[in-house]
Each structure stands twice: as structure tokens, then as C-alpha cells.
Image (cartoon, grey):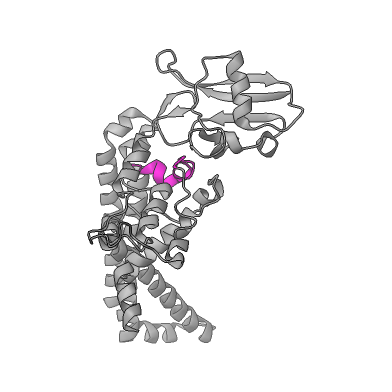
Amino acid sequence: MIGSTLFYVQRFSAVYLLAYTFWISAFLITNNPLEYKTWTVFTNQIDFLVLTSIAAFVSIIHAFIGLWTIGTDYFTSRTLGFLSMSFAKYADVIRGTYTFFFSLLGLSITTIILLTIWS
Amino acid sequence: MISVNIYRYNPEKDSFPYMQTFEFEKPKRDIMVLELLNQIKEKDPTISYRRSCREGVCGSDGMNINGKNGLACITPLSTVIKKNKLDLRPLPGLPVIRDLVVDMADFYAQYEKIKPFLQNDTPVDIGERLQSPEDRDKLDGLYECILCACCSTSCPSFWWNPDKFVGPAALLQAYRFIADSRDTKTAERLQNLSDPFSVYRCHGIMNCVSVCPKGLNPNEAIGEIKSMLLSGKNKENIIASDAVS
């Protein structure tokens, strides 16, 4: 059940981000050359603010699932044991630090995006 | 002359594994890799490898032959030798017991996990459980697996998580029973595979298909299991919906 949920979340988030990229690209192409006033009006619209906020959340979820998958592949006692037995002993700590670091990074980036567009 | 490099490791004597080279006259006729190994064993009886049927049925002599897993007994030398060199290593990802012999415990533990036997709680009508020819056909390409472990040990996801990812060989067998019209535990079987590791660690790189000595397609079976998990449909409600329509 959790496997299917993660599978769907990762795919739907990817589709959303692709659609969002197309939408922004279409705006930039149709308003070429872009002027400051046009860009300001566009980025102050409620649909831009809402869709970009969703994109920020979706991208952090998408990244978390991908990076969690990588972490549970490569930062295990077995995998780290190929490098060194002392690394293997601290596999859980290494993976926990890795997860904490990228979670913090993701939350920081999302917070910066939200503060930038809503302030 | 051909050079055969063989992975050697005897934990009672060696601190580290090493490659030992044997020089051979190139055989006049094409021989199987196992036959070559047997000739080497006559020169050096300390070399260890598994073999039994020597015709691709028992699955004992799975090994890494010039970088690709395969059965030594049905792999002609001419198809794998490169620049008159042949490297023989144990199946990757499993602990080495000695030389080309690996510990298959992780592999069999995953096989055991999928309950590789027919489960049916309903009483038997006439002494045996019957199956239509069409339903029997669905098992072709699934039941032929000989559990040589060539596929699972060529899969990086199995290398990283052999205790959590079921691996292509066992998943092929899981689907063999999921697809069997006589088995009534499809929902339970799917439930047991629904965590993020058992099936979903397969990313479809298809090494398993590339190396299978029996020409089977575990990736397709894994795809079928994923489709059933994602759609929430299992054999029982597919049969039920067919009956309604």
C-alpha cells in the first residue's frame, strides 16, 4: 500500500512539475521580449502564487522520495561495508544525517520560495 | 593460447581474494565454459565451483563470465571469450564461500518469502484442481525458472537490499502463483509485496532479462505485479468483473 502511494505521488508530482514548467515556458515565449511590468503583473496574479506554492511543495515531496530511495540504497551497513567496515557500523547515523540534511535543505528552499512570492 | 582468469578466495588461507591465471591451448572445437573449468580443475583440484546436471537444468553453475552472469554449462566459449581472455568470477552481490561458490541464503530467503507453492482453501472436486488450457498458457514463461540466481545477482537493487527487495527470480515465481487460476491467495500475495521495497525497488533496468539463461522475462512479470498493485485489482475481482459483464 505504501509502495503504491509513493509510486503515485512521485509520478503525479513529476507530471505537475512538467505541466508547471510548460505553463511558465509558454508565458515566457508568448511575452518575448519580456518586460518588467508584464512579469510583475504575472507574478502577482493569484493563480501564479497558488500554482507556484503547490510546485514548491510538490518538488520537495518528489525530491524527498527520490533521495530517500537513494539513501536506503547506498547508505546501508551492507553498501557502506564495501568501502569500510567502520563506515558500515555508522550506517544508520550516516543515513539519518543525510536525510536530515536534505530535508532541511528542501524545507529551506520551499520557505524561501514561499516568502519570495507571497511577500 | 587463451588466458582464463579465475577469482580465487579461500577464507581459511587467503586474507583477500585474487585472480589466478591459467594458460590454455585454444580448443579446436567450441566447448562450454564448464568443460573448460573441468579441465582447469584437473590441473588445479583446489578450484571450487558448483555444477551438477551440465545441461542448464539444475542451475548450479551460475557465475559471472566475462562480466555477464550465465550458466557455465550452456555458455559456449566462443560466445564469451574476448581477445583470447576469459574472466570467471562468482555471482556478484552474494557472500563468497570459496572461489566461485557463493552463499545463496539471501536469495533463498526471498524465495521463501513469496510462498512458492499453490494455496487454495476450497475443497478439491474430483481429486485434482482443473485448469483450462487458456489459464495454463498464462504460466508459460513463468514456471520454467530454475533458480540459478543469475538474474537476481545481476540486479543492483538486489545488491543493495537483498534482505528487503525480493529480486527478479522470486518475483517471477510470485507472479507465477498470482497468475495461476487455481491459487486463491492473490490478494494476500499482493499485500505481502505492497511495501516500498519488495517490488517497487525494481527500476526496470532489465539486467535480469539480459542475463536469464532460460530466456525468461522477470521484468514483464514484475510489471504485471506492479500494475495489479497500482490498480488495486487482483485476480478475484478481475474474474468477478468478467462474470458480471
Out of A76 and B191, give the one closest to the viewer: B191
Magenta extent:
B147-163
The quadrant of the picture occupied by the C terminus of chain A is bottom left
Q: Is residue B120 above or below residue A98?
A: below
Q: Is residue A36 above or below residue B220?
A: below
Q: Position of residue B171 (x, y in %)?
A: 39, 52
Q: Quadrant of residue A76?
A: top left
Out of B174 and B106, give the one closest to the viewer: B174
Q: Is residue A1 visible?
A: no
Q: Is residue B154 magenta?
A: yes
Q: Is residue B97 above or below residue B116?
A: above
Q: Is residue A57 left or right of residue B14?
A: left
- Name, please, the residue furthest toward the front: B126
| Residue displayed at 37% across by 40% down | B107
Q: Position of residue B149 (x, y in %)?
A: 45, 41
| Residue displayed at 48% across by 33% down | B60
Count of number-bearing discs: 0
Q: Position of residue B23 (x, y in %)?
A: 68, 19
Q: Position of residue B152 (x, y in %)?
A: 44, 44
Q: Quadrant of residue B84?
A: top right
Q: Quadrant of residue B54?
A: top right
| Residue displayed at 35% across by 48% down | B166
